[in-house]
Image (cartoon, rainbow, N blue to C red):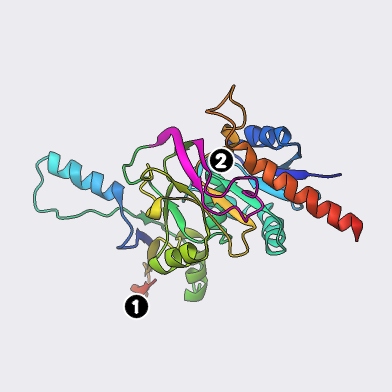
Amino acid sequence: MDVMPKPEILDPQGKAVAGAMARLGFTGVHDVRQGKHFELDVEDGLDDETLHRIATMLLANPVIEDWAVRWVGDEPGTDGETPG
Amino acid sequence: MTGRIGVITFPGTLDDVDAARAVRLAGGEAVRLWHGDDDLRGVAAVILPGGFSYGDYLRAGAIAAFAPVMRPVLDAARRGMPVLGICNGFQILCEAGLLPGALVRNAGLRFVCREVALRVENRSTPWTSGYRSGAEITVPLKSGEGRYVADEGTLAELEAAGRVVFRYVDPAPSGALHDIAGVCSADGRVVGLMPHPEHAVDPLTGPGADGLAVFASVFASVVDAELREDRM
């Protein structure tokens, strides 16, 4: 699950990272936004509704953050994105 | 048994001792509550002090919002019990959904520790009734994630309803939207602010005693309510 600051929320940490890249001489990076990445080891068949509740109640603060779930499974067909 | 005001300690809370002292200086009885408590021990109001509850893990206040003691706090707040969140306590109240908006990293990325001037913009809450209308007070601010944000609709609603309780007189050191230092719930009973009135209750240990009226206000409010109850 990826949790990112909403586009309209100022992300001073991302700006500081972008500034450091420029100081190191890296060009071609317009903007950096910093978020969080959670890896959840879940039971087979855990439903999207439960993941949605985990995201909105705890892992993300919907006032300031967007989130997205990406399933990474062993079986084919389990990869995919559920937009937050 | 009058004027019992609860002060909650979470793991990582720092300012519970000062908050309890402020309650006593204002005439009240400070009742220490623990994050694992499942009742509020008969208090008439409750304070969530500052600090770094649960190490600010995940987001400031995010874990504390689900501590066992928060269940009775939410129930009591819905019944109109006065609740005050200071600094990390404000963050917890926002995370718990008792107050709108959120507190994010200061715009300048620096932890800000200094005295600030605040204007009391709403004196109809139980935490601010002792101030003159429009009073300007000096209290310490010490936070790294004190930038108040909310969407435009919420900000407009807060402004229109007079729910901005405290506003920085000078531009907010955190970059808070609308220079908001503190807000209240729709019924005015729940108040949260980033600066620390409990550190300004005694000229010996703070910039003055401008913060004392926060605690004197709620003491007067709960004693008044208890007297009215006795007469019924």
| Mark 2: amino acid | Gly
Foreground residue among B150 and B117: B117
Foreground residue among B19 and B166: B166
| Left or right placement of residue B10 versus residue B76 in this view | left
Q: Position of residue A6 (x, y in %)?
A: 34, 62
Q: Residue furthest bottom?
A: A77
Chain letter for the residue marked with disc 2 in the picture: B
The residue positioned 35% from the left and 59% from the top of the image is A5
Q: Is residue B204 above or below residue A37?
A: above
Crowd rating for badge 2 (residues with CA inside 10 Å; few <14, some 14–19, many 20+): many
B2 part of magenta stretch: no
How far apart marks 1 and 2 lie (CA) works out to 48 Å
Residue wearing tag 1: A77
- Residue B76: quarter of image: bottom right
- Give the SS element for disc 1: loop
The residue positioned 52% from the left and 28% from the top of the image is B207
Q: Position of residue A78 (x, y in %)?
A: 37, 74
Q: How many numbered markers are drawn?
A: 2
Foreground residue among A3 and B43: B43
B113 part of magenta stretch: yes
From the image, state whether disc 1 or disc 2 is nearer to you. Answer: 2
Q: Quadrant of the C terminus of chain B?
A: bottom right
- Name the mark on residue B168: none
Q: Quadrant of the N terminus of chain B?
A: top right
The residue positioned 56% from the left and 29% from the top of the image is B208
- Give the SS element for disc 2: loop
Q: Is residue B230 visible?
A: yes
| Left or right placement of residue A50 versus residue B170 in this view | right
Q: Position of residue B218 (x, y in %)?
A: 69, 47
| Region in magenta | B111-139
| Mark 1: amino acid | Gly
Residue wearing tag 2: B50
